[in-house]
Amino acid sequence: DQQVKQNSPSLSVQEGRISILNCDYTNSMFDYFLWYKKYPAEGPTFLISISSIKDKNEDGRFTVFLNKSAKHLSLHIVPSQPGDSAVYFCAASANFGNEKLTFGTGTRLTIIP
Amino acid sequence: KAGVTQTPRYLIKTRGQQVTLSCSPISGHRSVSWYQQTPGQGLQFLFEYFSETQRNKGNFPGRFSGRQFSNSRSEMNVSTLELGDSALYLCASSPHLTGKYNSPLHFGNGTRLTVT
C-alpha cells in the first residue's frame, strides 16, 4: 500500500525554467511533509518541509505547495540549475510521535543546460 | 558538526550469511532510523530506535534486527541473507522521535549491500 506516490519517475527541464515535482498521498492523518534530494552514492539531503497548517512554504529557489483537500503537494524550483539534477523524494508523517516517515518512490530530475 | 556516519560503505556477502551494518548519528541526536532503498521502491522503513529502545518497526521479516547503544550509535543485522536483500541501507538520525516537533531526518551516505 503506497501511501505516498510520485507518479512521474523522471522529468527533464531546461536550465533557467521552472521545475515542478508532484506528490500525492492517501493517508489523511499525515500532517507534516518534506522533500529530500538525493545525488548518486550519497544519502538523501533535507530540502524543505511544510506543516499541514500552511499551504505554502518558500526557501530561496524552492517552494512547496500543499493542497490538503486534494491530498497533493508539489515542489517548485525556480530557476532550475544544472546542480538541481538529482532524485527528489517526497515524504510524510503524522505528528503523533512514534510515527515513521513514509517516502515516495522518487522522481529523477534532469536539468538540460 | 560531523554528519551521520555509516560503515562500511560497501559489502559483498553470499546467500545464507549474516551481516552487521553500523551507524553513528549526529552528536546529540537520540533517534536513529534505518531505511532500505531498492530501485523503484523508494525508501522502505525498517525500524527506529530512541534511547536504546525500538519505537517503531516496518514490514520486514524477523531476519532484520537492530539495536541502539547508550551513546546512540546503532547497528542493523540481517541474518540468512537472500538475493533480494541487495540494496542501499540508509541510516538517519534526528534529535527527537520521528513525527515529534517536525524534525527532519538527517541521512548518512548508506551501505551498499550486494548478496551473491
Image (cartoon, rainbow, N blue to C red):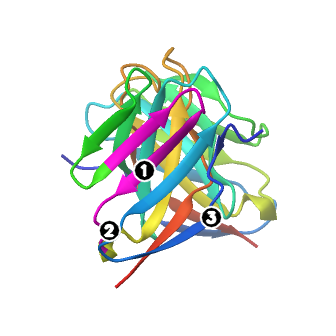
SS class of the residue under badge 3?
loop
Query: Could you tell me residue B12's position as x and y percent?
Result: 64, 71
Amino acid type, callout 3: Pro
**Dot 1 lies on which element?**
strand
| Depth order, front residue of B108/A22 | A22
Split into 4 quadrants, where in the image is the C terminus of chain A? bottom left
A5 vs A89, left or right, is right
Of circles 3 and 1, the one toward us is: 1
Number of other residues with Cα within 10 Å of mark 3, as a class: few under 14, some 14 to 19, many 20 or more: few
Q: Position of residue B63 (x, y in %)?
A: 76, 43
**Residue on which the image places disc 2:** A80
Q: In this picture, which residue range is highlighted in magenta?
A: A63-81
Q: Circles 2 and 1: CB distance less than 8 Å?
A: no
Question: Marks 3 and 2, Cα distance to the nearest angstrom?
Answer: 18 Å
Chain-order first, disc 2 or disc 1:
1
* Farthest residue, direction bottom: A113
Q: Which residue, given by chain and number where applicable, does mark 3 sit on?
A: A9
Q: Are marks 3 and 2 in contact (CB under 8 Å)?
A: no
In the visual, does B71 lie left or right of A109? left
* Quadrant containing the N terminus of chain A in the rendered view: top right
Can residue B33 be seen here? The reply is yes
Q: Mark 2 lies on which chain?
A: A
Is B37 above or below relative to A4? below
Q: What residue type is labelled 2?
A: Ser
Q: Nearer the viewer, residue A66 or A101?
A: A66
Where is mark 1, residue-wise?
Answer: A75
